[in-house]
Amino acid sequence: MPSDTPSPQPSPVERREFYRITVLLPICLQLKSDQTEATLIERSVNISGGGIGVTLNQTFEVNNILSCTLLLPGQVLFKSYVEVLRIDPITYPLNTYRLHGRFVRMANQDRELLIRHVIQFQREHLTKHYSA
């Protein structure tokens, strides 16, 4: 039975070992200290078992720890923390940024749940685009 303890942080090389896919998902990113109720907005999210990339209309500081809430298929509410690795400004539209972050303090069972959903997204993509 998987433990509820957080898994050790994957190294940058290990993070790239996780399969990544870009999908539309309802997501909310806010500072860990922000206690307001999460408002989920559907966005294109590049996601893996190691982290996320997402375009936002707000900026965060590098090393900020964010609360991340995702609504996965089957109405599965997934919550984790994300450490901001990089914020890249996008020239158009104005006030748009690309956030690159890694999941931190994630329990093994939560990472496994996320990886199962990423594999399911891949299956659906392959079936839709490459099946006869």
Image (tube, helix red, strand yellow):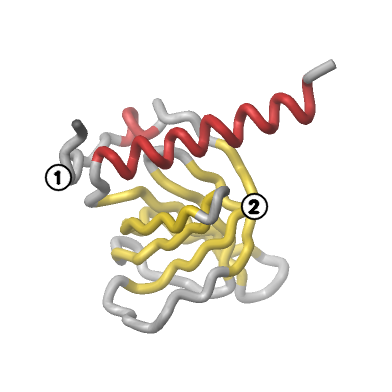
Crowding around mark 2 (Cα neighbors within 10 Å: few <14, some 14 to 19, many 20+) is few
Is 87 on the left or on the right of 83, as rendered?
A: right
Query: Who's the residue at 27% across and 51% down the image?
Result: 104
Residue at the right extreme? 132
User: Residue visible at 58% across and 73% down?
Assistant: 57
Return the mark for residue 5: 1
Give 77 or 126, whichever is nearer the viewer: 77
- Mark 1–mark 2 contact, CB under 8 Å? no
Kind of residue at badge 2: Leu
Q: Looking at this view, is 44 or 100 the one in front?
A: 44
**Element class at badge 2:** strand
Quadrant of image for the N terminus: top left
Q: Does residue 119 appear left or right of residue 102 in this picture?
A: right
Does residue 111 lie above or below 71 as drawn? above
Relative image position of residue 19 (x, y in whole percent): 49, 29
Q: How far across and how far down the image is residue 77, in percent?
A: 45, 58
Residue at figure coordinates x 34%, y 65% from the top left:
66
Mark carried by residue 87: none
Say above or below: 101 vs 2: below
* 3D distance between C-alphas at marks 1 and 2: 29 Å
Q: Position of residue 39 (x, y in %)?
A: 51, 75
How packed mark 1 is, by other alpha carbons closer than 10 Å (few <14, some 14-19, many 20 or more), is few
Q: Which residue is mark 2?
A: 24
Name the outermost residue toward the bottom.
36
